[in-house]
Image: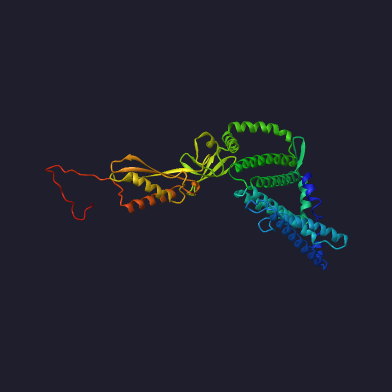
Amino acid sequence: MSLLTSTLLTPTLPAPPQDLAALMAELTRPTVLVEFAVLAVVMLASWLLVWLLHGARRAAAEPDTGRGSIWFGAHLVDGVLFPLLMLALAHVARRVLIDLGQPVALWRIAIPVLLSLAVIRLSVRVLSAAFPASRLMRVVERTISWFAWLGMVLWVTGVLPVLLDELDDIRWKVGSHPMSLRNLIEGGLSAGFVMVVVLWISAALEARLLAGASGAQLSLRKVAANALRAMMLFVGLLLALSAVGIDLTALSVLGGALGVGIGLGLQKLAANYVSGFVILAERSLRIGDIVRVADFEGQITDITTRYTLIRSPSGREAIVPNETLLTTTVQNLSLADRRVLLSTVVGVDYDTDVEALRARLIETVAAVPRVLADPGPAVQLTAFGADGLEMSIFFWIGDPENGQGNVRSEVNLAVLAQLRREGIGIPFPQRVVHVQPGAAVTAPAAGSAR
């Protein structure tokens, strides 16, 4: 049996019932009412302790990831702490009842149920915190739940010890080491437990690192959190392999093969991971920056180790590999200054008093919300068009994440209203047709297109 599995299960579970009929007979005795009452007290005491601890946690203003705490969950009783407290208090209550000479038939069922519930809650909460958007994790959570409840039923009915003995008889050799099917299953369970604990610790540390951070500080903490998670997963993988019984000295050959694989087939993937750490370390791009990559412009919402997520004002999202951000030109509109210069063009008649109109247009544009007063708007005569004078209007905004087309539209509407109030015409293309002498001019027929 795996050392980790033996250590976890031996002091936790009571001895399985040898006769299911005898257990059912014990559950029909009047003394079982006392056990039910004690179990109810255990549940109430556990809920009360969780409620008090949750109140102390809120008073301490501990960071929350927005998905609920692993310890407390979203509704106190759906976290890990509640079933663990019930399990611990159930052991104490069982020991007290045994010392008082009270039968403990109910606890042979209650403790395995509480242990299964604790395992399910631990795996579900940790996987949800570590991989919040993964659909595969939902399948893994359901699989863990089914196996946990199945193991509980087999233990209560007394089938599990017999099944483990039968699995122990199925043996083979891996090199010079004998191995049984029981060792493989127990080692896999131990490895899964180790990985869940590692994910739990890494998720808690990541939440601590990212709490209250923004801008450049958020980017630095993000790279630290990614590096910490990668390191802890690597250590957890080594511990999990050791729990299964795999000789870690054989990993030297695997490491060489993995290096060759990265150098040949996985070079793009490795380049994206390395680029992600470089971007976060150099802080050339930060979460919240407004950037333009090729023809796509938007705000950076997340920088992972493999890709960067950019969200445009229209709601579309682009997943850009990190290598692309290092090897191509990226326009960062908010690296040094969040202010963005926008412009629009309007045409007026040649007989317009341009100097007077420029001053009035500047006042009109400055009155538009979101247009900055410093630096203020400017109006310039930029071209002598074929049909009129072309005037360019330049203005600055300080919140490009709220959109640029909407504020440009507000400026255009304000300029149009100003020109109409003053009776200034906006020229449009006009053509003069000269008819040669003697040429026949035919009037269009009635009802024909004009």
Q: Position of residue 389 (x, y in %)?
A: 31, 43
Q: Residue furthest left?
A: 438
Residue 444 visible here: yes
Q: Nearer the viewer, residue 396 or 321?
A: 396
For this view, does 199 lie left or right of residue 106? Answer: left
Q: Nearer the viewer, residue 94 or 397?
A: 397
For this view, does 54 lie left or right of residue 102? Answer: left
At 78% across and 63% down in the image, what residue appears?
Answer: 41
Hey, which quadrant is residue 36 in on the image? bottom right
- Compared with 175, 148 (above or below) is below
Q: Position of residue 25 (x, y in %)?
A: 81, 65
For this view, does 378 lie left or right of residue 88? Answer: left
At 75% across and 59% down in the image, what residue appears?
Answer: 49
- The image quadrant where one finds the N terminus is top right
Q: Position of residue 377 (x, y in %)?
A: 42, 45
Colour option used = rainbow
Q: Nearer the viewer, residue 357 or 211?
A: 357
Residue 150 visible here: no
Count of numbered circles on the image: 0
Q: Nearer the viewer, residue 446 or 405?
A: 405
Q: Position of residue 238 (x, y in %)?
A: 71, 39
For this view, does 124 lie left or right of residue 290? Answer: right
At 72% across and 33% down in the image, what residue appears?
Answer: 250
